């Protein structure tokens, strides 16, 4: 995929930051010395960590130069690095590894979680939130438009760009086997948005990227037009003119014993 667009992502900053806040509230650490924010994006989640743990040494990692530029401008006193979580290696051990809306892009979660837990200090926490919305109309319709259009061959692999995450039982057992206690839950957020066009704008910076990034500007415009039309049918307008975007998210906080 092409680079992430921090400006597009931040159009819905309040809604996107709320899961990070909910996740951080469940972290049972008082004074961690070291924290890393995996997939830190434009720094909105990193800022929450810094506010709660002002004495901690905090690092933000992301693959996107644009996201990192926004994060550095937002939090100039913190350290941010360009890194691919799938390949990330470090000899350091962290008290908190925070991963908000990033691990769903990575395969092999059983091995991935075992590796991340191995980077925790004793008593440290791995705190993770992942969108669990591939069965929602928003995402089923992306795949449908991809299959039905003239770009079907080009986009044949787009639906597999994001990992289909496991069950509650999968994550519970993987984390227990890695030597952790596990706090696991799911929340469905309901976001009132200004019509189908706003749903399209929301996903242009995330879920739609595997579908629209490979297309020419003309194809991208046509794809988004068709997608908006089917989204408008799937998300009825409410009495106040809003549409309600359902957004399930899976959370867990695993503490290394």
Image (spheres, rainbow, N blue to C red):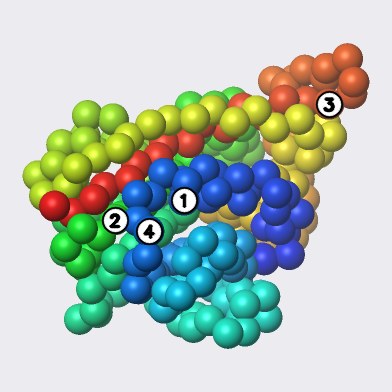
Residue drawn at point x = 41 percent, y = 78 percent: 57
Sequence-wise first label, 3 or 2: 2
- Where residue 202 sits in the image (x, y, percent)? 70, 45
State the residue position of label 4: 30
Residue drawn at point x = 73 percent, y = 42 percent: 200
Find the residue positioned furthest to the top.
239
Mark in front: 3 vs 1? 1
Task: Return the residue nearer the eye: 140 or 215.
Answer: 140
Q: Cβ–Cβ below 8 Å for labels 1 and 2?
A: no
> Marks 4 and 2, Cα distance to the nearest angstrom?
12 Å
Task: Return the residue nearer the eye: 72 or 103.
Answer: 72
State the residue position of label 3: 242
Residue drawn at point x = 67 percent, y = 75 percent: 74
> Marks 4 and 1, Cα distance to the nearest angstrom?
12 Å
State the residue position of label 1: 24
Sequence-wise first label, 3 or 1: 1
Sequence-wise first label, 4 or 1: 1
């Amino acid at each position: 995929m092409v680079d992430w667009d921090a400006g597009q992502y931040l159009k819905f900053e309040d809604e996107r930051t709320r899961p990070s806040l909910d996740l951080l509230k469940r972290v049972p650490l008082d004074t961690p010395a070291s924290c890393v924010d995996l997939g830190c994006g434009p720094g909105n989640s990193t800022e929450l960590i810094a506010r709660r743990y002002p004495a901690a040494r905090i690092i933000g990692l992301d693959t996107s130069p644009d996201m990192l530029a926004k994060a550095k401008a937002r939090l100039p006193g913190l350290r941010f690095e360009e890194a691919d979580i799938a390949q990330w290696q470090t000899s350091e051990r962290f008290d908190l590894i925070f991963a908000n809306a990033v691990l769903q892009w990575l395969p092999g979660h059983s091995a991935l979680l075992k590796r991340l837990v191995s980077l925790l200090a004793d008593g440290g926490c791995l705190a993770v939130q992942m969108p669990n919305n591939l069965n929602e109309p928003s995402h089923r319709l992306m795949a449908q438009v991809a299959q039905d259009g003239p770009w079907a061959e080009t986009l044949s692999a787009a639906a597999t760009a994001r990992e289909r995450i496991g069950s509650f039982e999968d994550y519970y057992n993987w984390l227990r086997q890695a030597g952790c206690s596990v706090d696991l839950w799911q929340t469905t957020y309901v976001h009132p948005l200004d019509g189908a066009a706003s749903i399209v704008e929301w996903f242009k910076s995330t879920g739609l990227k595997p579908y629209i990034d490979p297309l020419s500007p003309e194809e991208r415009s046509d794809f988004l037009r068709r997608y908006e039309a089917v989204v408008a049918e799937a998300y009825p307008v409410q009495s106040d003119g809003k549409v309600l975007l359902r957004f399930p998210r899976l959370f867990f906080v695993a503490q290394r014993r």
